[in-house]
């Protein structure tokens, strides 16, 4: 199983930016697609973005299109989520996940490996 560790969360004012990182280890030679999800208190975990193994394909939830960008560096075993123009409704714990059966999957149940999450809080 792949190990994932997120970082980069924090407190930011609305309109600000954060860049989340997800470093992976384990199964280094197996191609893997990645996803980012978030979960706010008392809400279900929701899809944010996904990226293919090559980085050539990306997918976004409608709520973050045009504001968030996902990219990766396989040599560094790292995936990032650049979040710009943050809104208070973006406040949540953000998780990276790996190994869905199909790249771009938006159902969290399809991902086999998860990080511990990093808190993002956007204040008005």
Image (spheres, rainbow, N blue to C red):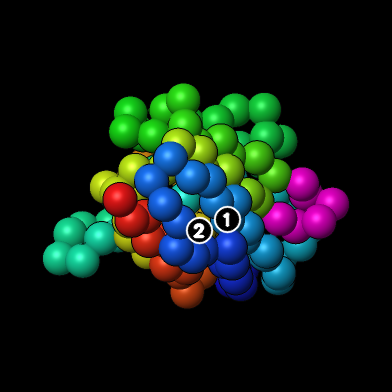
Q: Please determine whether, in this image, residue 111 is positioned above or below residue 105.
A: below
Badge 1 vs badge 2, beta-carbon distance below 8 Å: yes
Check residue 39 for magenta coloring. no
If the image is split into quadrants, where does the N terminus sit? bottom right
Residue at image position (77%, 46%) is 73
Residue 120 place in picture, x, y as percent: 42, 61
Q: Which residues, given as a range, are shown in magenta? A: 73-78
Relative to the observer, which residue lies in front, 38 or 35?
38
Label total for image: 2
Which of label 1 and label 2 is nearer to you?
1
Residue 61 place in picture, x, y as percent: 36, 34
Q: Quadrant of residue 94?
A: bottom left
Q: Which residue is mark 2?
A: 96
Q: Quadrant of residue 28?
A: bottom right
Relative to the observer, which residue lies in front, 103 or 96?
96
Mark toward the start of the polypeptide (1 vs 2): 1
Q: Quadrant of residue 2?
A: bottom right
Assign a secondary structure to mark 1: strand
Assign a secondary structure to mark 2: strand
Relative to the observer, which residue lies in front, 95 or 104?
95
Residue 30 place in picture, x, y as percent: 72, 55
Horizontal placement of 115 versus 76: left or right? left
Horizontal placement of 38 versus 25: left or right? left
Horizontal placement of 29 versus 1: left or right? right
Q: Which residue is mark 1?
A: 20
């Amino acid at each position: 199983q792949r190990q994932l560790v997120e970082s980069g969360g924090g407190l930011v004012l609305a309109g600000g930016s954060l860049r989340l990182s997800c470093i992976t280890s384990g199964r280094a030679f197996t191609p893997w697609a990645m996803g980012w999800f978030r979960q706010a208190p008392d809400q279900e975990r929701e899809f944010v973005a996904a990226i293919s193994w090559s980085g050539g394909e990306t997918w976004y939830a409608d709520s973050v299109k045009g504001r968030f960008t996902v990219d990766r560096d396989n040599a560094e075993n790292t995936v990032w989520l650049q979040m710009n123009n943050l809104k208070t409704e973006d406040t949540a714990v953000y998780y990276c996940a790996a190994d869905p059966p199909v790249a771009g999957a938006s159902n969290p149940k399809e991902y086999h490996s998860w990080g511990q999450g990093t808190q993002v809080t956007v204040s008005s």
